[in-house]
Amino acid sequence: MATGHDPHNESTQARGEAAAMRAAELRLRGAEIAAGATSTPASAANARERAERARERAASAHRAAATRHVEAGQAHRRAAAAHEQAAIRASDTAGGKHQDAAAGHRDSAELHDAAAVADQSAADADDPSS
């Protein structure tokens, strides 16, 4: 069991807190509009700024997901290689099982590769500078 500092958990918590703050802002703005408030140049600029930040967060999340998929694919390939090495040293029956496991890991690696490409494409679509 891992213990100690987990930066991924902290970033997840920070993102959750930021999302809760954005939701509260949107509820407040919705209540203002329901009460008859109209759009102003300042509120429109604020909405554009929030939308831009959301787009940036989406692109960042897609890039992070693509990176994790690449890492998962690499881990599956390492596992496949370990099973193939074990198959070389194993009996015929056990060797076949290791070969089957290796094939499963390679299939999983390919799925992660495809997911990484999809997430990177989504990040590129979210980021007009790329």
Image (spheres, rainbow, N blue to C red):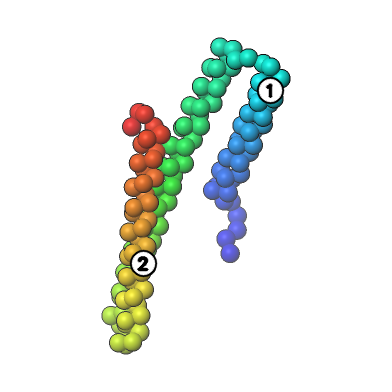
Q: Position of residue 77 (x, y in %)?
A: 33, 63
Above-or-below relation of 123 to 49 = below
For label 1, the residue is: 34
Q: Position of residue 105 (x, y in %)?
A: 36, 67
Which quadrant of the view contains residue 85? Answer: bottom left
Above-or-below relation of 9 to 97 = above
In the structure shown, which secondary structural element does the residue marked by tag 2 occupy? helix
Q: Nearer the viewer, mark 1 or mark 2?
A: 1
In the structure shown, which secondary structural element does the residue marked by tag 1 occupy? helix
Above-or-below relation of 94 to 77 = below
Relative to the observer, which residue lies in front, 6 or 112? 112
Which quadrant of the view contains residue 42? Answer: top right
Which quadrant of the view contains residue 120? Answer: top left
Above-or-below relation of 88 to 123 = below
Q: Is residue 25 left or right of residue 108?
A: right
Residue at the spot x=33%, y=87% of the render?
93
First-in-chain label (1 vs 2): 1
For label 2, the residue is: 105
Instruction: For the N terminus, give its image quadrant.
Output: bottom right
Residue type, mark 1 in image? Ala
**Real-space Cα distance between discs 1 and 2?**
54 Å
Task: Count every numbered label the image shows and give the total.
Answer: 2
